[in-house]
Image (cartoon, rainbow, N blue to C red):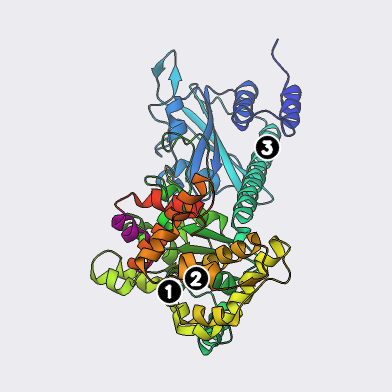
Amino acid sequence: MSKSIEQILLDISLNLSSNRSHEQQYQDLIEGVTEVFPCDASCLFILDADGLLTPVAVKGIARSVLARRYAPNAHPRLQAIIQSHKPVRFDANCPLPDPFDGTLLTESTTIDVHDCMGCALYVNNQLVGALTMDALAVGAFDNIDPLTLETFAALTAATLRNIAQLKALKAQNQKQQNVTQTLIQQARSQHNEMIGLSPQISQLRNSIATVAQSDYAVLITGETGTGKELVAHAVHAQSQRSDKPMIYVNCAALPDGLAESELFGHVKGAFTGANGARAGKFELADEGTLFLDEVGELPLSLQAKLLRVIQQGELQRVGSDQNLWVNVRIIAATNRQLAQEVANGNFRADLFHRLNVFPIHVPPLRERASDIPLLADYLLEKVRTQFNAPNLHAKPSVLKQLAALPWYGNVRELEHTLTRAALHAIQQGEKTITQQHFAAWLATDDVEKTSALLPQHSQPLRTLVEHYQKALIEHALAQNNGTWAQAAAFLQTDRGNLYRLGKKLGLTA
C-alpha cells in the first residue's frame, strides 16, 4: 500500500530531526519525490561554496553523476532553475540541452528525456540547492499541484539547510579540538620571558613593539638557541590577534611525504592511511598566527605552494579540488642566511621577499655578554623552584667566566650548562655553584673534555651515553652554525633522526 502525500510530507518533516547519515537523509528525500510526483528520474543538488551544484542523491539516473559538479552557467536549464523562486517547466520541445542527457536509466538502458521540471531550494532567500525531475511521458507534469510542489521544496530546502549547519558545527568542533590539542602541545615555551638590559635587547623589544600591531609578515633570524621562538610569541602576544591561536610548525621536522598534508590538511582517502579528513596548520591558524620555525629547511616543491597561500590566502587540502580561504599572519624564523640560500638556488626569491617584509635579527649571546649574569640568575630560578633549593646561587667569579665564553649554542647552551652545574652542586649538598661544578663543560683542553666523560663514581650507563650524545650534537651544531641539516651531515646521520634525538635530549624547544 502506497503512502499518501500527507504521510510522505510528514516523514520528510520528521527527517529534519533524524540521526541518520546525511547520505541516507538525501536519498530519503529523492525517494519521496518519486512517490509524490509522476517522474521517472530525479536529482537533488546542494550548492557548494564555489557556486557549483553538486548532486548528492539520484533516482533513475546513473550514480556516476554523483562524482560530478555542475557549473550553472554551463548548463542553461540549471541556470534557469536557480534563478527562479518558482518551479521551472521544460517541455519536450525545449531546445536547451539537458544536463542528464544519456544518463537516465530504464531497464538498464539509457533513454532520451521528454518532460523536465526543476525548482530552486531557498531558505530565507538564500539558495541552498536545487531539485530536478524528469518524465518519459509528455505532459506528465501538467496536473502537478503547485502548493504540493512548493511545500515539498520548502521541506527539502529546510533539510538541506539543517544538514549543512550540522556539518559546519561538526567541522568547527573538530577544528577547535585540533587547535586545543596543538596549543597544549606548544604551551611549553609561551610563558618564558625575554631577559636582558643590554642595548641589543632594548632594540629587539622596540622592533617587536613596532611590528606587532600590524599584519605584516615577520622574518626572525639568528643563530640556534638565541630565542627566536620567544620573539615570535612576543610578536603574537602584542598583536591584535593575541586572542587567537598561534600555531607552531617546525619545518625541519615535517615528515617526508606528509609535509603538504601537515600544512594544508587532507581529505579522507587522499593517500594510504588517510582514514579521515584532517585540517592542516593553516586552517588551525585561521584568524590567528602561523609560526614557521626553521623555514629555510622547506623543500623547494613546498615553497611554491606556501607562497600561493601567503599571497592569496587560498589553499586546497591534499586530495581535494575545493578551495579554502584563510586569514593568517605569518611569522617565520631561520638560522640560515636566506639571501645566500636564494643566491644558491635553495630558496625561492619571491617567497623570501614575502617573508622578509619586516626582518628581526636576534643577537647571539656573545654580543650581549652584559646580560649573562642576569640571564644566569633567571635560568637558575627554574632549578631553585624545581628542586626546592631557594639559596642556590653562582659564585661571582663563575658568572664572570660565563660572560667571557663564546656560547655558540647561545641561551640554550647556557641554560643546559647552568642546569648541569646546579644539579652537581645540589647533589653534593652545596648552595654555591663554583668552578668545579662546571669542570666537565667549561674545560678548554680537549683531553680534559674527554676525561670528563669518564665517571669518577657510579652512574647509570644510559645517563652517561645521553650526556655524550648531547655533547656531540651541541658540538656538531656549533661547528655548523646551528644548522641541523649540516650537523647531521657532520655526524653522518639522518637529519630527521638527529633532530628527534636532540629533541629527546632537550636541545630543541
Question: Element at badge 3?
Answer: helix
Q: Give the quadrant of residue 486.
A: bottom left
**According to the image, label 1 marks what residue?**
222
**Label 1 vs label 3, nearer the camera:** 1
Which of these two is toward me, 149 or 140?
Answer: 149
Taking the view exactly as shown, the residue that stands out farthest to the top is: 1
Which of these two is toward me, 170 or 249?
Answer: 249
Which of these two is toward me, 41 or 456?
Answer: 456
**According to the image, label 3 marks what residue?**
159
Which of these two is toward me, 232 or 245?
Answer: 232
Question: Element at badge 1?
Answer: loop
**Label 2 vs label 3, nearer the camera:** 2
Q: How crowded is mark 3: few (under 14 residues within 10 Å), some or many (20 or more)?
A: many
In the figure, is residue 139 to the left or right of 384? Answer: left
Q: How far is disc 2 from disc 3 in space, using C-alphas?
A: 51 Å
Please report whichever mark, 1 or 3, sits nearer to the chain's N-terminal start: 3
Q: Does the magenta stretch include residue 488?
A: yes
Residue type at the position of mark 1 = Gly
**According to the image, label 2 marks what residue?**
228
Residue type at the position of mark 3 = Thr
Q: Please, is residue 481 above or below residue 128 in the view?
A: below
Q: Give the quadrant of residue 174.
A: top right
Q: Please, is residue 12 above or below residue 84 in the view?
A: above
Q: Residues within 10 Å of mark 1 (few under 14, many from 20)?
A: many
Q: Is residue 170 magenta?
A: no
Residue type at the position of mark 2 = Lys
Taking the view exactly as shown, the residue that stands out farthest to the bottom is: 199
Q: How crowded is mark 2: few (under 14 residues within 10 Å), some or many (20 or more)?
A: many
Q: Note whether residue 371 is visible.
A: yes
Q: Note whether residue 264 is visible.
A: no
